[in-house]
Each structure stands twice: as C-alpha cells, then as structure tokens.
Amino acid sequence: MMKKVALVAAAAAMVLPLGLGVIAPATNTTTAFAATKKAAKKTTYALQSATKLKKAAYHVKAGRPALYSGAFAADRAKVTLSKKGTLKTGTTYYATKKIVVKAKATRTSKAKSVTYTYVKTGNAKVKGWVAAKHLTAGAAKKAAKRAVVQKSATKKVTTTATTEKIVKAAKAKGTTYNLVSAQTIKKSAYHFKAKAPAFYKGKFAADKAKVTLIKKGTLPVQKTFYATKKITIKRHKKTVKYLYVTNQKTKGFVLASKLTAGAFKAAD
C-alpha cells in the first residue's frame, strides 16, 4: 500500500514540470462530437517507477520510433501514453526523466516491464516519451560534426586574431638599430616619385647609441616635405640614412633613398 502511495506521489510530481494532463474520472456522458471524433491511439499502463534523470544527450540510430504524451492518474499509479508523433535520426534529444511501466500480457507475449524516457530537442519544439530501447547515448553525428566545424572556425578566428595582435604589437614596439650618427641639417625640400614611403617615429636611448623606429604610416602623395635632421643607422651590417621630414601634421623619419631632392611639381 505504501509503495502505491509513493508511486502516485511520484506521478503527480511528474505532471507539473512536464505540463502533462491528469487522467480524469470516467463519466457516462458522451457528446455527439466526442462520439464522432477519431480516438487517439493510447494505452494505459500500471506505473512501476518514475525517476528524474541528469540531463543527457541521445539520438536515434535507425527508424522512426513513436513519441508519446503522458497523462498521469491523480489517484492511482497509472499512466496513459498517447501517440503524438515520431522521432527521427540525425537529431540530438535530451533526456531528463524516465518511467517504468508494466505492459500487460498478450496472446504472443508475456507481461513485462518497459522503460520510457522523456526527451526533448534543444529548442523544445519536439518533446515527449519514447521507449528507451530506441535511444542511443550521445549526440547525433550531424550535431557533433557541426560542433567540430564550429570549434574549428572559432579556433581559426582566434588564431587570426592572435596573429593580428602579435603583428600590431610588433609594429607598436618598432625595431631598434645601432645609431652611427645624428645631425641637424639645413632645411631642404624633398618629394617622392614612386610608391609612398613609410615614415617612422624615432625613440632615442638615453644612455647608449640606439634608436628605435616605430612605423606611423605612409607619406601623403603630391606633397613637398622639408628635411631638418639626418640619422645614420646600422642595418644588416650596412649603414642606412633616414631624413626627418615634416609637412603640416605629417612628420617623422623616412628612408633617404626613397626621397628626391626638390619641391613637388605636378609634372613629377
């Protein structure tokens, strides 16, 4: 008797969170509409146990097993399963509850216990009870493959972002050279003829003959620049000259070999 009371309580607990119906007491009144409406395929079973599960992924390997809605009796250990559709392969379902029912004996089989699992899709559009024997633990391969692709794409984006950060950091840090000489020169006009050369900010060490050149951008086209300083550095075992040039807001060190003496003219 105590076991039956416990099962009824467990069944009642299953009803509320699942939004399932409760079997109402039978009445002798039948409307004309009810008499003509096609009855849903449903079966009532004796409820042996009802258990909550830790959420776990499952999928269907083959076929289209039936999906049922469950109506638990309020005053006895009974559950009625009504077919509402089918499950399909290639989809991941999440199990949260299970019940064990007693299937009656038939002419071809003996009475037996059957386990049903309550499953639903990630978006909860498909949900209901399915015979546990039709489920296989784990996510569907399609879902797993999609997760791998997504993970790969995320990894690629992360790698690209990291590379960009490294490049930006390297540019911000600049390159340090041995300083051979530094001098102020008479203000002279220069321009460039080919591709716009880069210009750099120069950071000079306070206690040693070193200079760090940090790229700021490229010189604007069709402009005249005025050089006022010159430095010579050691790069790849060769001496290289840079001129410090200005033009309004643009100012910095430019590789001297990229510049041509004289003001810019349209004919250039």
Image (spheres, rainbow, N blue to C red):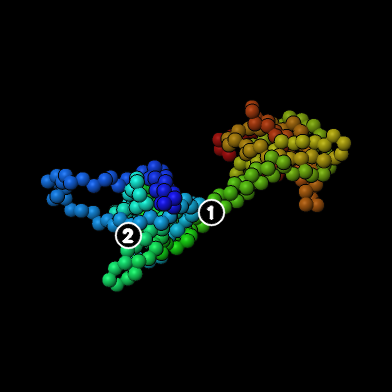
Q: Nearer the viewer, residue 145 or 67?
A: 67
* Dots 2, 1 in contact, CB < 8 A: no
The residue to which callout 1 is attached is 151
x and y, in percent, of residue 73 in the image: 33, 48
Q: Residue 102 occupies which quadrant of the picture?
A: bottom left
Q: Which amino acid, mark 1?
A: Lys
Q: Residues within 10 Å of mark 1 (few under 14, many from 20)?
A: few
Q: Taking 172 as reference, is 68 above or below it?
A: below
Query: Height in image: 243 above or below 51?
Result: above
Q: Crowding at label 2, few (<14), some or many (≥20) Cα neighbours within 10 Å?
A: some
- Residue at the front extreme, as displayed: 1
The one of 66 and 47 positioned closer to us in this rendering: 47
In this figure, which residue is indicated by the disc labeled 2?
66
- The quarter of the picture where residue 58 lies is bottom left
Nearest to the eye among marks 2 and 1: give it.
2
Horizontal side, residue 99 vs residue 237: left or right: left
**Which secondary structure, mark 1?**
helix
Q: Residue drawn 70% across and 34% down?
A: 252
The residue drawn where x is 65% and y is 31% is: 250
Disc 2 from disc 1: Cα separation:
33 Å
The C terminus lies in quadrant: top right
Using the image as rendered, state which of residue 28 and residue 44 is in the foreground: 28
